[in-house]
Image (cartoon, rainbow, N blue to C red):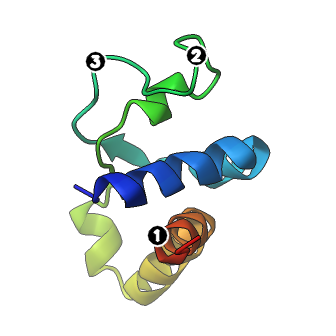
Amino acid sequence: MPEPSVAARLRGAFVAAPDAWAASNASAGTVQDGPMLVRVPKPWPADHPLAEDLRRKSCTTWLPLTKNKVTRPDSASVVRDGAARLAPLVRIVASAANDRG
């Protein structure tokens, strides 16, 4: 789990750019999982449109793969395309995590 200061920066980053955050999370077929807080952390209201994401203590995002996808001759393109789909999300998270204010 990220340190509290990093978690606060991450939350602030996606709240500041909700459209970019939503678009980065809209990759068809991605799955997100991770422990959740019971309530939305302050200073955000409980009914915030991004409440579910605000409640995340950490997050793991992945693209499910089948044996068929990773054993076919063009499996490198499957990996490349998956990385491209996750790149916007990674950029937002990395930028916020590395921002020291």
Q: On the image, numbered disc 3 is attached to which residue?
A: 38
- Residue 65 at x, y = what percent? 31, 61
Could you say which is closer to the camera, residue 79 or residue 4? 4
Q: On the image, numbered disc 1 is attached to which residue?
A: 97
- Residue 29 at x, y = what percent? 48, 47
Rendered image quadrant of residue 5? bottom left
User: Residue at horizontal 50%, vertical 83%?
Assistant: 80
Amino acid type of disc 3?
Val
Amino acid type of disc 2?
Pro
User: Residue at horizontal 74%, vertical 52%?
Assistant: 20
| Residue 81 in view here | yes
Residue 40, labelled with which disc?
none
- Residue 94 at x, y = what percent? 50, 73
Could you say which is closer to the camera, residue 63 or residue 90? 90
Rendered image quadrant of residue 22? top right
Residue 45, labelled with which disc?
2
Q: Quadrant of the C terminus?
A: bottom right
Q: Give the total number of marks visible in the rendering.
A: 3
Give SS at disc 3: loop
Crowding around mark 3 (Cα neighbors within 10 Å: few <14, some 14 to 19, many 20+) is few
> Up-down: is 20 above or below 45?
below
